[in-house]
Image: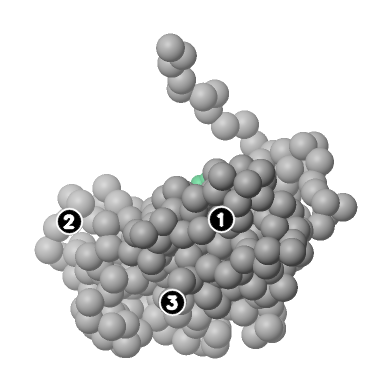
Amino acid sequence: MTAITIDEKKCLQDGICAAECPGRLLQVETGKSCPSPTPDFEAYCLQCGHCVAVCPTGALSLEGLKPDDCRPMGPDLRVTPEQAEQFLTGRRSIRTYKQKTVAKPILEKLLDIAGAAPSAKNQQPWHWMVVQDPQEVHRLAGMVIDWMRGLIEAKPDMAVERGFTRVVSAWDNGEERICRGAPHIIIAHGDKDWGFGAEDCTLAISLLDLYATSLGLGCCWGGYFYSAINFHRPLFEDLGLPDHHKAYGAVMVGYPKFRYRRIPLRNPPRVSWK
Ligand SMILES: Cc1cc2nc3c(=O)[nH]c(=O)nc-3n(C[C@H](O)[C@H](O)[C@H](O)COP(=O)(O)O)c2cc1C
């Protein structure tokens, strides 16, 4: 049984699906035949859906993905370059949050959008853990502080260099700098042996962050937080992550308390042209 179906009445025999297939797994004689799968189609198809998404007439279906299952592409929703520039350069890491939780359907939508990120071999390797309860976020931040205290004892030079002493003394003075008082933290985790887990999860978190910004939410990477998950077993176990997983990233989510008025300068590109 082949994994593609062609509606021959709709197919224009234009070869676009074959040209866009990442593995070149469709064969078409342009203008003469509809696409058919190569013999190694099933072995190498990434299920990326490009063939279905690019067909002008919706003639091609994959097993489990019909044209009507796809979200429509609305040209009227295209952002202008000016909008894109301000949006992308105006995103900030948010470190002061309102004491207001984000509704679960919105958190679900963030994950839905994150899932549109590119991933090596279209593996979509991310699993998510969403900490919904602000008190739980605070408790878990306390476990990160426990990890830092241990390192301050065991490797004082490294702890100072990584800023742990400052973060712990802030905690002791009642200021939480791990999750910055955000009401939620979202952890991306996945198989620890997948070679592209870091890249894939980072990209997914980036989409989540950008989409959250479009909703008036704010995010900030929790570098201390996900490092602690991977290096402090009690936290890993407390979260109940599967044994063969690791945390590839974590991001705070909430409503920003303040509005940014300016976009700070960044380094000019370090680039060589050949
Ligand atoms: C991998 C990674 C880890 C980070 N960890 C933290 C963190 O633990 N705490 C924090 O306040 N910011 C953290 N950040 C945010 C960076 O400090 C921030 O992106 C940088 O200062 C630039 O600011 P901007 O994101 O507002 O442009 C992290 C960012 C990345 C990419």
Q: Position of residue 65 (x, y in %)?
A: 59, 73
Spatial CA distance of label 3 from label 2 is 62 Å
Q: Which residue is mark 1?
A: 35
Q: Position of residue 105 (x, y in %)?
A: 68, 83
The residue lying at 17 percent from left, 56 percent from top is 156
Tell me the quarter of the image containing the N terminus.
Answer: bottom left
Foreground residue among 250 and 6? 6
Disc 2 C-beta below 8 A from ligand 1 = no
The residue lying at 79 percent from left, 46 percent from top is 79
Q: Is residue 117 visible?
A: no
Disc 1 C-beta below 8 A from ligand 1 = no
Report helix, strand or loop for mark 2. helix
Q: Residues within 10 Å of mark 2 (few under 14, many from 20)?
A: some
Spatial CA distance of label 2 from label 1 is 64 Å
Spatial CA distance of label 1 from label 3 is 15 Å
Query: Disc 1 marks which amino acid?
Result: Pro
Q: Which residue is mark 2?
A: 156
Tell me: 225 left or right of 263. left
Q: Residues within 10 Å of mark 3 (few under 14, many from 20)?
A: few
Q: Which residue is mark 3?
A: 1
Tell me: 84 left or right of 222. right
Query: Disc 3 marks which amino acid?
Result: Met
Q: Are the two marked residues, 1 and 3, in contact with CB atoms closer than 8 angstroms?
A: no
